[in-house]
C-alpha cells in the first residue's frame, strides 16, 4: 500500500519521530484497534512506561497479524500516559517499534488522569489500512 507522509514546510517539523499526517489512496480494509494496555495474557503488568508501551505495541502487532497486516499498514497511533514523566519511556518504545517505517505513522500523545487499574500508565490505539 502506498502511503505518503504529509509534513508541509509551512509547519514546524514534528517534535519527534512521527508524521503530521499520512495520506493513503483508496482503502479496501480499515482496521481500528481499541486502546491496548500493557497487560500480558497471564494478566501480569510490567513496571514502567517503556515496558508497558512495548507490550501495548506488541499487542497491536498481534492484532495486525491476525488480519494479515503489519506495522507498515499503521496510519496513526494515539497514546495516553498518566504522567508527563512517562512520555520519554513511551516515545522510546514507539520509536523502536517504528524503526524502519517510511513514512512513520501520524501520532498523538496525551496525558490523562488514569486508567481502569492503577498499575497501568500507558494505553495505545492504532488505525491501520490496506489498499
Image (cartoon, rainbow, N blue to C red):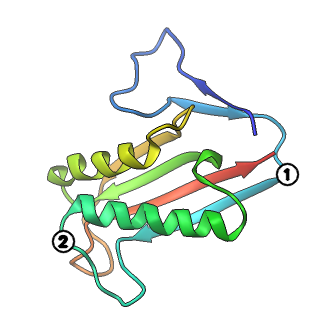
Residue 120, image x, y percentages? 27, 73
Identify whether 114 is placed above or below 124.
Answer: below
The residue labelled by disc 2 is 47
- Label 2: state its secondary structure: loop
First in sequence, mark 2 or 1: give its number.
Answer: 1
Identify whether 41 is placed above or below 72.
Answer: below
Give 47 or 33, whichever is nearer the viewer: 47
Which residue corresponds to the image point at 69% horizontal and 60% vertical from the top-left?
31
Identify whether 66 is placed above or below 129.
Answer: below
Q: Residue furthest top?
A: 10
For residue 79, the mark is none
Number of other residues with Cα within 10 Å of mark 1, as a class: few under 14, some 14 to 19, many 20 or more: few
Residue 93, image x, y percentages? 33, 52
Kindly report the distance in space between the C-alpha atoms of the residues bearing marks 2 and 1.
39 Å
The residue labelled by disc 1 is 28
Question: In the displayed structure, does residue 94 sit left or right of residue 65?
Answer: left
- Label 1: state its secondary structure: loop
Give 103 or 75, whichever is nearer the viewer: 103
Amino acid at each position: 500500500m502506498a502511503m505518503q507522509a504529509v509534513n508541509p514546510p509551512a509547519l514546524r517539523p514534528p517534535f519527534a519521530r512521527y508524521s503530521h499526517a499520512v495520506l493513503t489512496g483508496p482503502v479496501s480494509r480499515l482496521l481500528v484497534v481499541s486502546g491496548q494496555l500493557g497487560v500480558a495474557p497471564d494478566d501480569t503488568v510490567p513496571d514502567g512506561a517503556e515496558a508497558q508501551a512495548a507490550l501495548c505495541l506488541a499487542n497491536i502487532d498481534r492484532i495486525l497479524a491476525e488480519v494479515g497486516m503489519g506495522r507498515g499498514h499503521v496510519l496513526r497511533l494515539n497514546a495516553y500516559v498518566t504522567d508527563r514523566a512517562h512520555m520519554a519511556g513511551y516515545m522510546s518504545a514507539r520509536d523502536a517499534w517504528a524503526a524502519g517505517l517510511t513514512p512513520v505513522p501520524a501520532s498523538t500523545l496525551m496525558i490523562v488522569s488514569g486508567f481502569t487499574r492503577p498499575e497501568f500508565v500507558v494505553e495505545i490505539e492504532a488505525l491501520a489500512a490496506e489498499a
